[in-house]
């Protein structure tokens, strides 16, 4: 069923130019093989090449760099991402924000489904989320991305590996580690300050935390096993947390 949904999702959420690559057009040249094929196919109409025939410039096209940002609900991922954007040249893409945007988009056929998943703290099928992420990456024309709140479960990770992993250069996972009580207080505080989110309430939070413990933590552990996690203690105040984040990005060459 989700394969069928995926195809509809791709049609529905892909509002970028048909066939556009992930890189901006000027940075998405033909592959070496394609260039060679093109040159040879038009050989007849061209003057005989000089010796040596061609000097083919080296064509190393850099893939977009991606940092996954994970942590419990309310750990401070969004807060830290906006600080990273200010300090380093990254584009912030929050999977939750993209889903909320799609939920509110007039004519979206996924609005009801997304709302049901969000309110119940469940993870939306990856075909929808991954397409939203890829389209946002393409539309931005940028090449450094913070992908916040993704991959959140095995389905997210599998879908990403199918659709995106080859197209990007994943740098590391930035993991904001924060106790459950602090996370709950932060989300409730955010709700009280008028976030307007339908899931900043105790009932949704219990489900979100359970989804985080059961589905997201194993993904973080998986990346940890692969040596790809940069863990940050997210319980201090936001500026102190950012001090640690900054250290990580500087040490990683950004
Ligand atoms: N280090 C911090 N100390 C105190 N409050 C914080 C800190 N970081 C963020 N907050 C506050 O906690 C709330 C949640 O923060 P934020 O939205 O950044 O979390 P998040 O991890 O992106 O949440 P979610 O996963 O639910 O989207 C916000 O009201 C924010 O202002
Ligand atoms: N990969 C994702 C990310 C988010 N969602 C849904 C379910 C979450 O509870 C909700 C809010 O996300 P947040 O803003 O807290 O990161 O969005 C999802 O299904 N899949």
Image (cartoon, grey):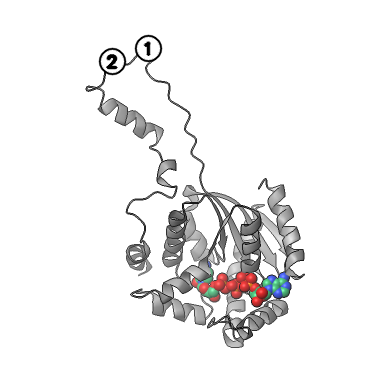
Left or right of 136 in this view: 38: left
Classify 84 as above or below 217: above
Quarter of the image for residue 223 reads bottom right
Which residue position is annotated with label 2?
Answer: 48
The reply, left or right, for residue 183 in relation to residue 42 is right
Q: Residue furthest top?
A: 51
Q: Is residue 12 left or right of residue 100?
A: left
Q: Quadrant of residue 217?
A: bottom right
Q: Dot 2, how many residues are within 10 Å of its Cα: few (below 14), some (14-19), or many (20+)?
A: few
Rendered view: 140 above or below 76 = above
Is the N terminus in the top left, top right, bottom left or bottom right quadrant?
Answer: bottom left
Outermost left residue: 45
Picture disc at residue 133:
none
In the rendering, at what x and y percent does residue 208 appear? 58, 78
Check disc 2 and report its element: helix, strand or loop.
loop
Q: Position of residue 250 (x, y in %)?
A: 71, 49
Q: How many numbered badges does the structure rendering display?
A: 2
Residue drawn 37% across the image and 17% down it: 53
Label 1 Cα crowd, 10 Å radius (few <14 / some 14-19 / many 20+): few
Q: Residue drawn 50% across and 64% down?
A: 156
Q: Quadrant of residue 26?
A: top left
* Residue 31 position in % (x across, y down): 40, 36
Residue 94 in sight from this viewpoint? yes
Q: Residue at x 31, y 27 (%)?
A: 39
Callout 1: helix, strand or loop? Answer: loop
Tag shown at residue 51: 1
Q: Percent position (x, y) of residue 10? A: 35, 62
Residue placed furthest toward the front: 86
Q: CA distance from mark 1 to mark 2?
A: 9 Å
């Amino acid at each position: 069923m989700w394969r069928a949904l995926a195809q509809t999702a791709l049609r529905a959420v892909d509002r970028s130019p048909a066939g556009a690559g992930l890189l901006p057009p000027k940075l998405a040249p033909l592959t070496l093989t394609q260039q060679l094929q093109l040159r040879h196919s038009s050989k007849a109409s061209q003057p005989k090449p000089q010796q040596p025939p061609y000097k083919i410039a080296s064509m190393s096209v850099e893939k977009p760099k991606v940092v996954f940002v994970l942590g419990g609900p309310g750990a401070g991922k969004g807060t830290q991402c906006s600080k990273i954007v200010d300090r380093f040249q990254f584009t912030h893409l929050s999977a939750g924000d993209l889903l909320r945007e799609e939920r509110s988009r007039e004519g979206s056929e996924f609005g009801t489904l997304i709302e049901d998943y969000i309110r119940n703290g469940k993870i939306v099928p990856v075909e929808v989320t991954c397409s939203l992420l890829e389209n946002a990456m393409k539309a931005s024309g940028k090449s450094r991305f913070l992908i916040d709140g993704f991959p959140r479960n095995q389905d997210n990770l599998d879908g990403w590996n199918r659709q995106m992993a080859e197209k990007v250069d994943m740098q590391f996972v930035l993991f904001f580690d924060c106790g459950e009580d602090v996370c709950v207080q932060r989300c409730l505080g955010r709700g009280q300050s008028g976030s307007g989110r339908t899931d900043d309430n105790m009932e949704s939070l219990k489900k979100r935390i359970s989804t985080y413990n059961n589905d997201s933590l194993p993904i973080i552990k998986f990346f940890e096993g692969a040596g790809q996690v940069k863990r940050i203690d997210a319980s201090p105040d936001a500026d102190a947390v950012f001090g640690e984040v900054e250290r990580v990005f500087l040490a990683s060459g950004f």
